[in-house]
Image (spheres, coloured by chain):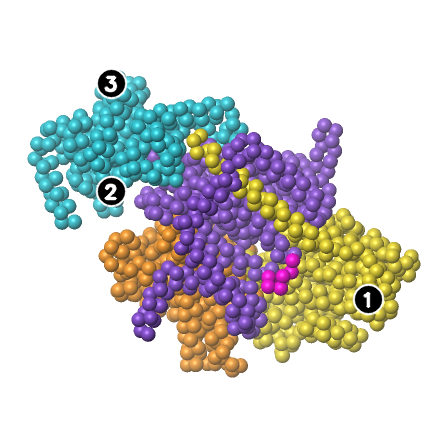
Chain colours: A yellow, B orange, C cyan, D purple
């Protein structure tokens, strides 16, 4: 009553001044972004109209390495196409590359997706790299009918939402899990397995697909959820849980452990298992296909571990030699997990664009045309022949098994 | 039924965790005693101890596998490096994040918020400078089974943890009970105003308390990291667990921290053979909530002066 | 129990403390304390430092819960007395016991007006929903509490300082403000914990006038802890003397002043005070 | 020579010298956090390249200049302050007129309503997802931390409850609701659910000392997240929930369904704008009511408040529940907007982020929470989308952590302080009062 009056006055004044400032700044921010978007224009350096192929994935945060593996592959494919020396020869259009960082997070990916949709030059996106980010971003891409070809998001649910613009060049977890179970039963002749998942979306799905197939093959399956830890970027659990969980696994007498999860937690869990006296086979998934698994667990612990991946190792593939060396030149590091898939995804898009241009001219390449083209494309890439089913999944289920050698290197053993 | 299958394995593992919780909990308890404040950033003191131990051992141990007396020396060296790094960070923390606030007699909320800020600052800075991948500590000793309890192996690592913790705890207990520094801490804990009237330099006592807490926390960080490696995010969960242990035993109470740590370590480990490991942290946090609801003074009651 | 037997004898007692014992750990703070206060009376509790006076207040207001004994309070002569022990301080305040503190505990960042208003509002019912929807009742209550607050400030002579921060008030004004805030809760018994401690002569005179008016004009019983014997002797109708947690004398100021144990207790403390 | 070095020593321990040391230290820290990332396996790389390179000179120079300016200000503080205050008073003078004030409110709302028309689609998305949602969250937490002085570190748990309520009532969880509802009808239900969770958690724990509350709420936040992530048969587990329904309006012959993807931003923006305005009005009315005064009383002196007939527990629970329900409310909006819930996003870090927003703006200050949250979230996204070479998105919390410490040391009342709060802090510094509800009941002020 007596002091009340003064407070709102001050509040309002400040409110006024600062929110005008914020509005102004927002506008600045927006104008900056808007100017960076480009429409298809004739470029002086290349020929024909310019189109952008974007990459979306984590370029910072805990999963940045995986994102960079793919980013440089996409960039390389675009550069090669522009140079006119690639398999596509001289193209009647010029390509641009842009990379967008979603940190693998579902809260950021919608705004990243919107920025790509806003950029009218973008005709197709390679990515998003992660399943959670894809789930959050896909409504935006889908509303704009902008094709997304993911090299690495393997969550089965992604293909069931009816997003017509969604494609992926890897087999989903529903393919990987059973393939792993078959491999363990048929090739390794194991009869009992302990399934551990790290409570991540990916691991839960994969373990869920693995278990029924393993049971069907007559294996005895016990399972346990051991969440990823705060030691690693993925988890909420604490590392002190590993010795406890490992002793439970040891007591169960299982012949093998199937670890669904990521390399960082797997390294700690593998150490705990060996420390608890578990001597059986260790088997994990593409989340663990990373040299950091070996450095984290130590070579003596990691040696002999089998790792499956719907991705192929291109370092030993003679057809991929030039890709491998050019990647190294561009990125400054060797190809890694999903580099080859990202390269193939980009080239698939380019091949679609090329055939559109051949059929009805370079200026008729639109987002809708690219989506339509991807639905019918057949393209032979380095990793596999790419052909999509109607829901966007890749036709065929290619799985490969890798092994950690006593020296600590990871080599491909063969298809699962 | 499931409870008994792995009982001794889980019990021993739980004890080992409990010892480490106890070491960290001491840092919370001592600071709480003198400042009446939860030092949220103590988990980062712990983290920096692990990094300190790691860097020193990386430079000392080459590719060879040490054994015997060399192992003992290396473990002691790692502990010392960890303790010194922890103490240095704790000292700086008090200087930068707490002392200016105390000078201004800032509200307690400001201390807590400043501590949270310091915690986020420190661990993210560690991530920036030292990389965001966990790094393994080079082996200072060969881990093997020393003896068995009811068929459950007790490993070298567990023995080291238990011995180091017990020695440090007894040392701290004696220091607080017998030395001039300890008398200062107890005086400030009981009544800071009176203590300052009696000529105790409160600033110095608080600084020393942080340093002692930092020594213990840093050593604990190194111990913790031996099997699991060092990561910039490693402090958060052990920090909360240790705080739970401190509250469980009676915050401000040195022996309480010990008992609380062991009880918590065992209590959260035992159910693992019956439930999904996911629920293990729920058990620990559940214990915290229940203790605070029904016996907020903990098992031994809270008083730094009385117990020491 | 028939109504006649309980109500009739207590009809004129506003509060009846019987055999209250309060212990902290091994220390007995109050032992077997009994005292009665008549309705409308100004009763003073005196005693040396550490005699348990403030502990008694804390028992009467629900801050402490004594281990033994009973405290019967009868705010309304037409109702039965109720037990105070076991109620939280805010419930006790609702019963009609208000208090001030030994060192004043005002809401320092609020104005004089707001301090009293908080007291007045404790008898109101506006909740979050009413406050947000500005219901007719809320507005009526706001008007009433503003009105009442100004009356109380007028009563203690602080109307002119209504807009001053309470922490900026002079010492004596702060004591009177605390009384006004306590009066806002519509008490029938007001407990004053050393209101004159540290006050100068003119402030004491002003306080004395306010306490008398609280008693005579508002008809509120006053229970007073005070060290200033001149003040006690001039306004208290009866005096209770505590020493080491026990009642050692009760009576009119004149009789108590002559009591041998009281003199001893006070002489003893004087020495203690010199020593400490 | 000796005397001179002695004088230097004395000076260095004096206020000016200490401030110079502080500014230099700050400059070095800034040089470190804007410096290059460390390399894996080479822990000193970042430090060396931040401190032992010429760029550090620029930082130290900036520190010394800042010290010089601050010394200049300190010397002339008493002379300049009245002038600054007068200018400020002059600037806000027109607002004491009721018409001007209401006019400015209308102007601000109009400006806010026009905002989406002038910004790009990306910024529309950011304005809704990152700014608007967090403004709403900050306003709610402000009730808990600012008004009632309680530190709640599990605030995001209620956001999660709101989000999952939206998922449940639109029928996309493994457990099915009795009837499937439009999210508009979910809003009150989610608010009730979050409020109930707040009351259930608050009733036992709010009796505790305030700093214990911080830990218990932290634990609660973790438990809720683990449950959401683990209890797959109820919540969908770690896979998250997908396909949460969007808002739709279906009354008086109007049939409007909120669009998907980037087109959803503008309608959701207006929805959020309305709710933010409603929250501002509601919390403003609360602050200046009997309830708000009771919160202030409890925050300042719980014992005195109890003696005045205020039930501290009741009002603390009330504040806690109001904060929780705001969080739950925001959860429904966000879940329905994005259509997807990932339980791992609701981490402690998000609770801390909202706390940082409130602390930065000014605890207990509605314009502070509003503008502080908007500004920090805008800045964070501006940096993220601008790709400056010195800024790495991963280091965000290094900056935020440093910001919080600096705020607590130099401006604990926030950039736009509430008048009551800054008075309390000022008084606490003089040794009067406690300024928060964290002191144990019964302890001396």
Judged by its main secondary structure, the magenta piece is loop
Q: Chain of mark 2?
A: C
Local secondary structure at mark 1:
loop
Q: Chain of mark 1?
A: A
Q: CA distance from mark 1 to mark 3?
A: 109 Å
Residue B243 visible from this viewpoint:
no
Q: Position of residue C170 (x, y in %)?
A: 29, 37
Pointers 1 and 3 in contact (CB under 8 A)?
no
Q: Nearer the viewer, mark 1 or mark 3?
A: 1
The image shows residue D222, relative to residue D22, as above or below, that is above
Q: Which residues are magenta?
A: D386-392
Counting other residues with Cα less than 10 Å from the Cα at mark 1, is it few (<14), some (14-19), or many (20 or more)? few
Seen in the image, is C40 located left or right of residue D61? left
Q: Quadrant of residue B244?
A: bottom left
Residues A32 and D306: in front is A32
Q: Chain of mark 3?
A: C
Seen in the image, is B14 located left or right of residue A55? left
Residue topped by disc 1: A45
Earlier residue among tags 3 and 2: 3
Give yes or no for residue C145 being in the magenta stretch.
no
Q: CA distance from mark 3 to mark 2?
A: 33 Å
Residue occupying image coordinates x 66% and y 70%: A306
Residues C162 and B94: in front is C162
Residue topped by disc 3: C8
Residues A160 and A130: in front is A130
Q: Quadrant of residue B130?
A: bottom right
Residue A146 visible from this viewpoint:
yes
Counting other residues with Cα less than 10 Å from the Cα at mark 2, is it few (<14), some (14-19), or many (20 or more)? some
Residue topped by disc 2: C23
Q: CA distance from mark 1 to mark 2?
A: 92 Å
Counting other residues with Cα less than 10 Å from the Cα at mark 3, is it few (<14), some (14-19), or many (20 or more)? few
Local secondary structure at mark 3:
helix
């Amino acid at each position: 009553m007596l002091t009340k009056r003064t407070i709102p006055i001050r509040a309002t004044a400040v409110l006024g001044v600062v929110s005008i400032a914020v509005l102004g700044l927002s506008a600045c921010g927006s104008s900056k972004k808007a100017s960076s978007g480009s429409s298809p224009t004739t470029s002086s350096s290349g020929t024909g109209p310019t189109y952008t192929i974007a990459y979306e994935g984590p370029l910072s945060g805990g999963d940045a390495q995986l994102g960079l593996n793919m980013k440089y592959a996409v960039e390389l494919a675009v550069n090669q196409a522009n140079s006119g020396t690639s398999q596509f020869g001289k193209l009647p259009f010029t390509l641009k590359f842009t990379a967008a960082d979603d940190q693998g997070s579902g809260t950021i990916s919608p705004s990243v997706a919107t920025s790509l949709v806003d950029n009218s030059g973008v005709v197709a996106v390679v990515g998003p790299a992660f399943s959670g980010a894809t789930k959050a971003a896909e409504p935006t891409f889908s509303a704009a009918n902008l094709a997304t070809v993911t090299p690495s998001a393997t969550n089965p649910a992604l293909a069931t939402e009816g997003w017509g613009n969604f494609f992926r060049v890897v087999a989903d977890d529903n393919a990987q899990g059973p393939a792993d179970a078959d491999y363990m039963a048929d090739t390794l002749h194991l009869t009992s397995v302990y399934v551990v998942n790290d409570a991540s979306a990916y691991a839960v799905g994969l373990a869920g697909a693995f278990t029924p197939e393993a049971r069907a093959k007559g294996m005895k399956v016990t399972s346990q959820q051991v969440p990823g830890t705060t030691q690693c970027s993925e988890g909420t659990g604490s590392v002190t849980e590993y010795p406890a969980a490992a002793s439970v696994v040891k007591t169960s007498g299982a012949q093998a452990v199937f670890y669904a999860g990521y390399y960082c937690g797997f390294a700690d869990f593998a150490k705990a298992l060996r420390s608890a006296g578990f001597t059986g086979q260790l088997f994990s998934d593409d989340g663990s296909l990373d040299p950091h698994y070996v450095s984290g667990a130590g070579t003596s612990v990691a040696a002999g571990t089998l790792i499956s991946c719907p991705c192929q190792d291109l370092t030993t593939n003679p057809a991929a030699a030039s890709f491998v060396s050019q990647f190294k030149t561009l990125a400054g590091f060797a190809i890694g997990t999903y580099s080859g898939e990202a390269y193939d995804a980009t080239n698939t898009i380019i091949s679609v664009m090329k055939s559109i241009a051949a059929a009805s001219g370079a200026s008729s390449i639109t987002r809708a045309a690219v989506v339509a083209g991807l639905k019918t494309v057949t393209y032979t890439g380095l990793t596999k022949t790419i052909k999509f089913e109607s829901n966007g999944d890749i036709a065929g289920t290619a799985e490969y098994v890798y092994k950690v050698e006593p020296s600590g290197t990871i080599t491909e053993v063969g298809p699962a | 039924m499931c409870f008994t299958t792995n009982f001794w394995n889980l019990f021993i593992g739980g004890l080992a965790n409990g010892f480490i919780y106890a070491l960290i909990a001491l840092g919370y308890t001592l600071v709480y005693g003198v400042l009446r404040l939860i030092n949220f950033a103590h988990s980062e003191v712990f983290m920096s101890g692990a990094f300190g131990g790691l860097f020193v051992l990386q430079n000392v141990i080459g590719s060879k596998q040490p054994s015997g007396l060399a192992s003992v020396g290396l473990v002691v060296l790692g502990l010392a490096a960890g303790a010194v790094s922890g103490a240095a960070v704790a000292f700086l923390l008090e200087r930068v994040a707490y002392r200016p606030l105390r000078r201004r007699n800032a509200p307690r909320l400001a201390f807590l918020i400043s501590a949270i800020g310091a915690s986020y600052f420190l661990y993210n800075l560690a991530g920036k400078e030292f990389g965001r991948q966990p790094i393994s500590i080079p082996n200072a000793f060969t881990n093997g089974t020393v003896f068995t309890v009811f068929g459950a192996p007790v490993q070298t690592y567990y023995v080291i943890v238990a011995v180091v913790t017990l020695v440090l705890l007894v040392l701290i207990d004696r220091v607080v009970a017998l030395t001039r520094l300890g008398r200062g801490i107890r005086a400030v804990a009981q009544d800071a105003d009176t203590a300052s009237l009696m000529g105790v330099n409160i600033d110095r006592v608080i600084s020393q308390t942080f340093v002692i807490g930092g020594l213990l926390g840093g050593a604990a960080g190194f111990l913790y990291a031996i099997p699991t490696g060092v990561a910039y995010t490693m402090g958060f969960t052990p920090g909360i667990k240790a705080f739970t242990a401190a509250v469980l035993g009676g915050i401000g109470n040195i022996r309480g921290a010990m008992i609380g740590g062991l009880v918590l370590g065992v209590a959260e480990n035992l159910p693992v053979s019956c439930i999904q490991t996911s629920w293990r942290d729920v058990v620990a946090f559940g214990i915290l909530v229940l203790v605070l609801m029904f016996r907020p003074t903990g098992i031994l009651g809270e008083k730094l002066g009385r117990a020491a | 129990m028939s109504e006649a037997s309980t109500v009739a004898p207590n009809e004129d007692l506003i509060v009846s403390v019987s055999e209250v014992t309060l212990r902290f750990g091994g220390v007995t703070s109050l032992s077997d304390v009994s005292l009665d206060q008549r309705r409308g009376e100004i009763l003073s509790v005196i005693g040396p430092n550490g005699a348990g006076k403030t502990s008694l207040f804390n028992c009467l207001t629900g801050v402490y819960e004594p281990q033994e004994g009973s405290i019967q309070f009868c705010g309304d002569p037409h109702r039965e007395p109720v037990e105070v022990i076991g109620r939280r301080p805010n419930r006790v305040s609702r019963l009609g016991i208000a208090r001030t503190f030994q060192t004043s505990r005002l809401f320092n960042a609020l104005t004089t007006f707001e301090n009293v208003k908080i007291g007045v509002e404790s008898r109101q019912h506006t909740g979050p929903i009413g406050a947000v929807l500005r219901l007719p009742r809320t507005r009526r209550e706001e008007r009433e509490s503003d009105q009442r607050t100004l009356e109380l400030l007028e009563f203690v002579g602080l109307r002119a300082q209504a807009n001053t921060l309470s922490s900026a008030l002079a010492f004596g004004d702060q004591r009177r403000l605390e009384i006004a805030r306590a009066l806002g809760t519509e008490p029938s018994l007001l407990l004053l914990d050393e209101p004159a401690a540290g006050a100068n002569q003119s402030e004491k005179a002003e306080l004395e006038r306010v306490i008398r008016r609280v008693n005579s004009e508002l008809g509120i019983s006053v229970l007073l802890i005070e060290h200033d014997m001149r003040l006690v002797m001039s306004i208290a109708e009866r005096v209770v003397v505590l020493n080491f947690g026990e009642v050692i004398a009760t009576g009119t100021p004149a009789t108590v002043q002559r009591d041998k144990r009281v003199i001893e207790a006070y002489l003893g403390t004087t020495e203690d005070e010199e020593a400490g | 020579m000796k005397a001179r070095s002695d004088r230097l020593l004395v000076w260095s321990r004096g206020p000016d010298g200490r401030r110079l040391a502080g500014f230099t230290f700050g400059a070095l820290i800034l040089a470190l956090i804007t410096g290059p990332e460390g390399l894996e396996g080479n822990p000193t790389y970042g430090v060396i390249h931040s401190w032992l390179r010429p760029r550090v000179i620029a930082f130290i120079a900036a520190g010394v200049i800042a010290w010089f300016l601050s010394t200049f200000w300190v010397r002339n503080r008493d002379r300049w302050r009245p002038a600054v205050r007068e200018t400020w008073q002059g600037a806000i003078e027109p607002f004491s007129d009721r018409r001007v004030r209401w006019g400015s409110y209308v102007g601000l709302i109009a400006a806010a309503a026009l905002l989406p028309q002038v910004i790009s689609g990306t910024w529309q998305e950011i304005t809704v997802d990152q700014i608007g949602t967090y403004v709403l969250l900050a306003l709610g937490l402000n009730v808990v931390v600012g008004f009632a002085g309680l530190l709640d570190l599990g605030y995001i748990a209620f956001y999660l409850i709101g989000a999952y309520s939206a998922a449940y009532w639109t029928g996309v969880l493994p457990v099915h609701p009795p009837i499937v509802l439009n999210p508009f009808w979910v809003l009150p239900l989610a608010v009730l659910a979050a409020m109930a969770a707040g009351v259930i958690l608050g009733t036992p724990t709010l009796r505790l000392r305030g700093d214990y509350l911080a830990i218990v709420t932290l634990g609660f936040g973790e438990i809720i997240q683990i449950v959401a992530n683990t209890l797959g048969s109820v919540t969908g587990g770690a896979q998250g929930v997908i396909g949460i329904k969007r808002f739709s309006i279906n009354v008086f012959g109007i049939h409007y369904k909120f669009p998907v993807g980037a087109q959803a931003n503008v309608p959701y923006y207006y929805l959020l704008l309305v709710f933010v305005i409603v929250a501002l009005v509601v919390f403003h009315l609360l602050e200046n009511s009997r309830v708000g005064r009771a919160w202030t009383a409890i925050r300042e002196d719980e014992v005195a408040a109890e003696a005045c007939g205020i039930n501290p527990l009741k009002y603390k629970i009330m504040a806690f529940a109001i904060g929780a329900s705001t969080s739950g409310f925001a959860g429904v909006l966000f879940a329905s907007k994005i259509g997807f819930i990932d339980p791992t996003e609701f981490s402690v870090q998000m609770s801390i982020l909202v706390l940082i927003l409130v602390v930065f703006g000014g605890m207990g200050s509605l314009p502070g929470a509003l503008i502080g949250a908007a500004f920090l979230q805008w800045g964070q996204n501006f940096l993220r989308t601008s790709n400056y070479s010195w800024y790495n998105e991963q280091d965000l919390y290094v900056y935020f952590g440093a910001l919080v410490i600096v705020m607590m040391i130099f401006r604990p009342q926030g950039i736009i302080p509430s008048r009551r709060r800054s008075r309390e802090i000022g008084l606490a510094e003089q040794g009067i009062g406690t300024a928060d509800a964290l002191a144990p009941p019964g302890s001396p002020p």
